Amino acid sequence: MTTGDQSPIPDYPSMLRLDGRNYVVAGAGVGMGRHSTHALAQAGAAKIICVDVDAGRADEIADEVGRDVAIPWVGDVTTREGAAALGVFAEQELGKIDGFVDIIGMARWESILDMTDETFDWEIDINLRHAFLLSQELGRRMVTTGGGTMTFIASVSGLTSGPMHAAYGAAKAGLMAWVQTLSEELGPKGIRANAVAPGTILSPRMDAVFTEEQRRVNAAHPPLGRMGATSDIASAVLFLTSDLSSYISGRTIVVDGGVDAMFPYPTTL
Ligand SMILES: NC(=O)c1ccc[n+]([C@@H]2O[C@H](COP(=O)([O-])OP(=O)(O)OC[C@H]3O[C@@H](n4cnc5c(N)ncnc54)[C@H](O)[C@@H]3O)[C@@H](O)[C@H]2O)c1
């Protein structure tokens, strides 16, 4: 204590710990989901339900993290049936659900004038509908047991224009708006809701489709001089899940190596 400040000093590193807490990670199999699952487990989470629509991936991540902590669950949480079944399973396996991380999202590349109805509906389902469903199916249970955290993966495409994937950007913008109202409605019930908006991240899916030129351009663009790694996103997820962020709710953290902060001045000036 100093003479001008009597407030207690917390043990800051311990605020990152999740010991004894139980989580659900939706989209846990690869990439940001895999890294986020490891991050929560390393921080001491007691149980983590590893959700994936791909049975092999759900099993692999559970094996990799360790079956003492990780429990695989296979299903599609973009449907009411899938999300409801997950809610029942999570309550049975975890008892108290301390939070969830929702990684699920994907984009197709079509111009606005050529976009089909089917693509538009698919983008809303794969990027937004599961947030609505999990907020209800897991959120209703969380409010009865004292609250917790909800953390979603959005995208910088929801903050700026997203040429050739407008519906993706619109759905991710919707997700960030969803998080704001979640935080207001559920904050009084002990729930914090936040999102992470990644820039270009070299996830296994992107790694499989990027050309050499795309790799070069995407690595050269950020002020930090590289593409993002899935572990960069997991770090933000862990922060938002932990008590280090206990007064942050309704916000989106941009993790893009500084791209979104730049005004496009010509580099020759
Ligand atoms: N990679 C990037 O550059 C980038 C940039 C911005 C935002 N994002 C967002 O990051 C998130 C993760 O992207 P990624 O490429 O690491 O993940 P990914 O597409 O590889 O998917 C992660 C896991 O989710 C599972 N999954 C997919 N649909 C599911 C469903 N309906 N139900 C249950 N599981 C399902 C997949 O099988 C996979 O194992 C997405 O929301 C994406 O929109 C990615």
Image (spheres, rainbow, N blue to C red):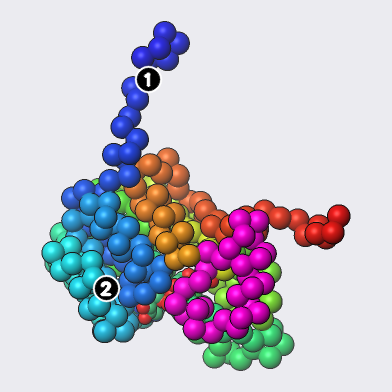
Q: Quick check: is 127 in the magenta stretch?
A: no
Q: Would you say 163 lies left or right of 28 here?
A: right
Task: Point out residue 216 in the picture as x, y percentages from the top left corner.
Answer: 64, 73
Whether residue 96 appears in this view of the structure is no
Task: Point out residue 54 in the picture as x, y percentages from the top left corner.
Answer: 31, 84
Q: Residue at x 31, y 64 (%)?
A: 37
Q: Residue at x 57, y 76 (%)?
A: 168
- What is the CA distance from the residue labelled 1 to the residue labelled 2? 43 Å
Amino acid identity at mark 2: Ile
Q: Identify the residue under disc 2.
A: 61
Task: Point out residue 182 in the picture as x, y percentages from the top left corner.
Answer: 44, 56
Task: Point out residue 188 in the picture as x, y percentages from the top left corner.
Answer: 37, 44
Q: Identify the residue under disc 1.
A: 7
Total marks drawn? 2
| Ligand 1 picture quarter | bottom left
- How crowded pointer 1 is (Cα within 10 Å; few <14, some 14-19, many 20+) is rated as few
